Image (cartoon, rainbow, N blue to C red):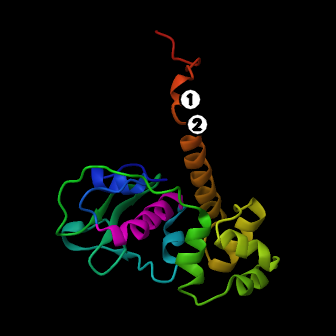
Amino acid sequence: MIRSFRDKITEAVFDGENPKGFPSDLLKMARRKLRYLNAAAGLGDLRSPPGNRLEALTGDRQGQHSTRITDQFRVCFIWTADGPADVEIVDHHRKGAAMTKKLKPMHPGEVLREKFLIPLAMSAGALAKVCGLPRTRIERIASEQTGVTADTALRLAKALDTTPELWLNLQTDYDVQVAKRSLGKTLDRIETVNKPRAA
């Protein structure tokens, strides 16, 4: 889970907002990279997707890692024992941003489709066969019609060389975002009853 962001623009993209001046054609891809990073249980999860191009950085970024969004943009971060920290989207031409509209929550099927099936040139049916699942289960996940269960997470992890926690974290993140938007201001009206007592 991401521990901290280095700037407001990166945090806004992670939250599904569309920062003014951020290239709209990169928005979904950048958010997908950030959400995937958030769900990763270890650096191994970041090595697995074809095209993720995980790199250990050198020079003035010694101690950081990055995954490329495009040749111009990358996500840089420090991997700690608690997960990624100081996460930022790096581009030499960007300026400050004001927030506008929000993107819809990112379904784990988008990650499955865009980071694995397409780069591997693999059909949902072929992956389902490898996983020992009905073709329709992987098709429905990839088309964002159904969620990832613990059973499916274990199978995907084995087939795609990730951790099952990655898939469950992506699913939980999606479910929480959907619920938060659905509840809206109702959540603000709920009183916290378990408050710390004064010493």
Horizontal and vertical percent position of residue 135: 78, 79
Task: Judge left or right: residue 52 versus residue 189.
Answer: left
Q: Which mark is residue 5?
A: none
Residue at the image point whose x is 53% and y is 71% from the top: 44
Q: Is residue 84 magenta?
A: no
Q: Is residue 48 visible?
A: no
Magenta-colored span: 23-39
* Whole-number angstrom distance, CA of label 2 to CA of label 1: 5 Å
Secondary element under disc 1, as helix, strand or loop, is helix
Q: Is residue 116 left or right of residue 9?
A: right
Residue under label 2: 183
Residue at figure coordinates x 49%, y 53% from the top left: 1
Q: Which residue carries the number 1 mark? A: 186
Bin the neighbour count of mark 2 within 10 Å (Cα to Cα): few under 14, some 14-19, many 20 and up.
few
In the image, residue 191 above or below residue 52: above
Q: Residue at x 71, y 83 (%)?
A: 127
Splitting the image into 4 quarters, where does residue 30 fall? bottom left
Residue 22 sits in quarter: bottom left
Badge 1 crowding class, 10 Å Cα cut-off, few under 14, some 14 to 19, many 20 or more, is few
Assign a secondary structure to mark 2.
helix
The secondary structure making up most of the magenta span is helix
Contact? badges 2 and 1 (CB < 8 Å)? yes
Q: Residue at x 75, y 84 (%)?
A: 130
For the residue marked with disc 1, what is the amino acid?
Thr
> Residue at the top extreme?
199
- The kind of residue tagged 2 is Leu
Instruction: Return the x and y of residue 107 as percentages of the image width and height.
Output: 59, 62
